[in-house]
Image: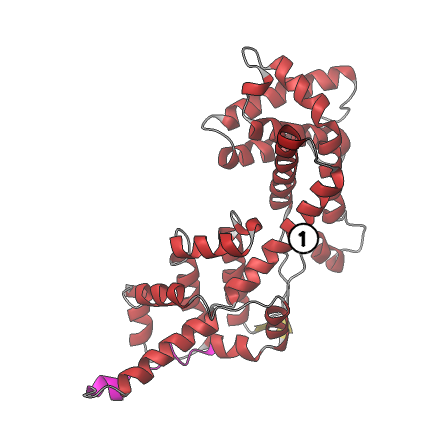
Amino acid sequence: MRKFSLNMLNRRILRIKVFKSLYAAVQTWETASAASLADAQAAFKQSVEATRDLYLFMLGIVEPLTALASERLQAARQKAHPTEEDLHPNTKFADNLLARYLSENADFVKGFNKKKFSWQQYDLVLKKVLNSIVTKEWYQAYMASPKRSMKEDCALFTHIFEEEFVDLNELDDLLEDMNIWWNDDLAYALTWCCRSFSDIASGKEWSLPPLYQSELMKRSSAGPVEDDSVFAAKLLEYAFCNYSDYSDRIAKLAEGWEKDRMVLTDICLIVCALCECVHFPNIPLRVSMNEYVEIAKYYGSLKSNVFVNGLLDKLIRQMQESGEISKR
């Protein structure tokens, strides 16, 4: 089987993680004046690793969810007065090939166990998910189909991952308890789980994905490829070191707003955007602006994207006039 490769973190996600690390550092300044660049860098590194860990943890639910279904079938057979269906159940889900594949994949088992992950203590979540799954039309259609294949099993789990885990309060609570960095990464991790299912269904062998997109690009490119990890580290350093200067400029330009009344998320986003515009000449200005305006839609206030877009446009023009930004 051919191995496939997924890159966990693209530039959009890295920008979000840099912004969050800066935001956390600034909050520390305001409460204890104890933040350091090293602290921010350590937090960023933890955040990056946590995304792949969450992907790995969620992939690990396939086997225990399958095992729970099998346990229910066995319990039904042992009832005092089992029905014909109890004695001769449909075992298609309980015998699905994806669970067997992951449980026998040495790379997956090693990676999952290395993190000391387990779903054993989260049986309430497993039961709630399975109870929901069996009521769905797509599950019933899967069970009614006489076909049995890895492709069909992967398609079923794609349905499960797309529809059962987002907005599941019990899952949100356990993820928050397990890792503070998992708060906003679930949807992204689930997307990568589904991509894994698609590749496994097409006959490719699973292996732990590299963290950065550039790691894959280096393998297929004959020329030099900018390292995404270097990009993120530099962006965080520039944003941290220039925060005071750039936040003062933002406050001066934002008419009618005192700096301490402005939304901190907006300030941090604009600071990150300015640092990218100043210090990364190979990234077009329009790309940087669009990226942070999009991020503002999800992490700022109701009208943050409009505010960030307007302030960024004015500040970039000022910095072009002063020569601080030379690219277009």
Query: What type is the residue that disc 1 sits on?
Result: Gln
Examine the image and state in which quarter residue 75 appears. Answer: bottom left
Reply above or below: 290 against 88. above
Residue 295 placement (x, y as % from top left) = 55, 36
Examine the image and state in which quarter residue 275 appears. Answer: top right
Examine the image and state in which quarter residue 36 appears. Answer: top right
Indicate yes or no whether the magenta region holds residue 96: yes
- Regarding residue 168, the answer to whether it shows in the image is no
Task: Answer few, some or many: residues within 10 Å of disc 1's Cα (few below 14, many 20 plus, some between 14 and 19).
Answer: some
Residue 119 placement (x, y as % from top left) = 48, 68
Location of the N terminus (image quadrant) = bottom right
Query: Image point 29% across, 64% down: which residue?
Result: 136
Location of the C terminus (image quadrant) = top right
Query: Image point 48% across, 75% down: which residue?
Result: 98
* Front in this rendered view, residue 113 or 225: 113
Residue 261 placement (x, y as % from top left) = 54, 19
- Disc 1 designates what residue? 213
Taking the image as shown, residue 148 lies to the left or right of residue 313, namely left
Taking the image as shown, residue 123 lies to the left or right of residue 315, namely left
Magenta-tinted stretch = 83-97
